Image: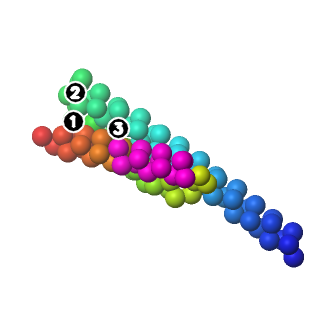
Amino acid sequence: MNNAVERLSDAVERRDRRTADAGAVVAVAGVVSAAIAAVLMFASGDADAARGFAFAGMIGVIGAVTAAAKSATAERKAAFATGGVLLLIASSTMFGLSFS
């Protein structure tokens, strides 16, 4: 009985680790998208393309929240939560600026 519980616990930990890793990948993609939006907005003046990349950056916030929720250590949780907030601020600012 104890072996079955340990196997199930290990399976849940592996699933949480995979989910956290996937969330981290989405968060990094969101950061890259927000950076591309800034370059498009200020360097080339292409507001429509910048708006699309900024929206993709806001989707990256979902990945950061997922990674924060499923991370095993408090340090990783704090890093992803802080990164998610900063990503939300950056991408929503770029999204709003693309309309002006």
Q: Nearer the viewer, residue 74 or 36?
A: 74
Disc number for residue 47: 1
The residue located at (27%, 36%) in the rendering is 50
Picture layout, residue 83 above or below residue 17: above
Residue range highlighted in magenta? 74-86
In this image, 31 relative to 55: left or right? Answer: right
Q: CA distance from mark 3 to mark 1?
A: 13 Å
Q: Amino acid at mark 2?
A: Phe
The residue singled out by tag 2 in the image is: 42
Q: Report x, y in % for residue 12.
A: 69, 63
Residue 73 x, y percent position in the rendering: 59, 52
Instruction: Residue at the far left: name it.
Output: 100
Classed neighbour count for the residue bearing mark 3: other residues with Cα under 10 Å, few (<14), some (14–19), many (≥20): many
Q: Is residue 9 above or below residue 36?
A: below
Q: Residues within 10 Å of mark 2 (few under 14, many from 20)?
A: few
Secondary structure of residue under mark 2: helix
**Where is mark 3, residue-wise?**
34
